[in-house]
Image (cartoon, rainbow, N blue to C red):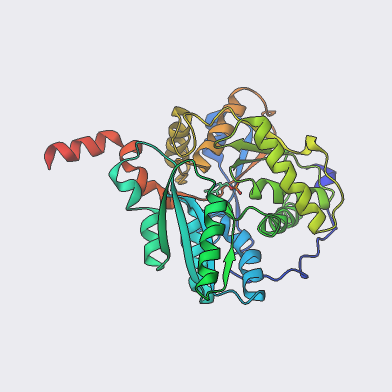
Amino acid sequence: MDAHSRQTKKIDLDRFPRVALCHQPTPIESLPRLSEYLGGPNVFVKRDDCTGLATGGNKTRKLEFLVGEALQQNADTLVTQGAVQSNHVRQTAAAACRVGLACYALLERRVEGAGPSYERTGNVFIDRLFGATLEFRPGGLDMNAEAMAAAERLRDEGRRPYFIPGGGSNEVGALGYVSCAQEIIDQVAAMDTGFDWIVMATGSTGTQAGLVAGLHALGASLPVMGVSVRQPREKQIKAVHDLAARTLATIDGGSLPTSSVIVDDGYVGPGYGVPAESTLEALDLAAKLEGLLLDPVYSGKGFAGLIGLARANFFKPTDNVLFLHTGGSAALFAYETTLLPQTAAAEEATA
Ligand SMILES: *Cc1c(COP(=O)(O)O)cnc(C)c1O
């Protein structure tokens, strides 16, 4: 345990509007069979896949603050956007139901060549169960601009929209992961082991930015490795750092050196929403060694990063590494034919 990680400092988040949506603290569990298989480090998992709202995931922490602000502004509709299999849209649609708001979501067809279940099952299916209004868009548009335009149209019709950017990643949503940083430091203080690294998937940046900002504000010297799910390293570092700096300004936490933002882009594979070989292996190992579900878009790539870095001896064998499990298993069903092609083919043959 690193002495610097034992903190008594607290971040005051009480001045921000917030609604309770999340099971917290989420548990930290050890993964002994996977750790043994890798020959070290000791791998632990922070179960943010178990945040409780509509199968859970990292967007729920962000939505506590975003929906808090929406209610403060007397909004009647949450407007947001994401990929077709967006976990963020699913959690936003659920949060809207929890507080009695409508949800209007634009879904971008960002993934090419996805099977027939991709637009029907998984997260889209759940969005529909929550009664969200969905509009599809082709890939490659500026989706935040599209969603803001949709919000303006709703305003013209007399509605009171509240715009949430893709992934809930702005300085309001990132407060959810400032809060998670505090939670991890409190859990570390109560455990007899500390952590040498946090490893996680990074996409629209709010999760890593909030976590890094929170750890910095707490004075904790616990490095965070973001495993990119889409962008090259330099671009992702800049985007995470920009938002982390704005988040720190929001909580009066001082300035942040760029060196606090660490990203590995070696596990993106063919691109956003398309699993690499290493993603499939990570899903398989987590499932068969630990009974742990990952997803093919985010947590599978993040976990592939952890496995790859362990094999490259990036960690010391005695290090304690905490994988932040950001959720995503609701998307598994939409990827059935990619994940289990033999089963799918066999069923087709006997049908
Ligand atoms: C959105 C998401 C992420 C990435 O978090 P960002 O804040 O967008 O970087 C990781 N894992 C899952 C399952 C997600 O849905």
- Give how far across and how far down residue 266 sits, in percent: 58, 27
- Give how far across and how far down residue 291 sits, in percent: 44, 45
- Give how far across and how far down residue 32 sits, in percent: 56, 40
Residue pushed farthest top?
312
For residue 91, side relative to residue 188 (left or right): left
For residue 215, side relative to residue 154 (left or right): right
Which residue is pictured at 42% across the width and 36% down the height?
284
Decide which of 134, 209 is in the foreground and name it. 134
**Quarter occupied by residue 3:** top right
Residue pushed farthest right?
254
On the question of residue 249 being in view, the answer is yes
Q: How many marks?
A: 0
Q: Is residue 124 above or below residue 226?
A: below
Decide which of 173, 36 is in the foreground and name it. 173
Which residue is pictured at 84% across the width and 45% down the height?
4
Residue pushed farthest front?
156
- Give how far across and how far down residue 279 sits, in percent: 47, 33
Q: Is residue 13 above or below residue 336?
A: below
On the question of residue 214 being in view, the answer is no
Q: Quadrant of the C terminus?
A: top left
Which residue is pictured at 46% across the width and 56% down the height?
106
Q: Quadrant of the N terminus?
A: top right
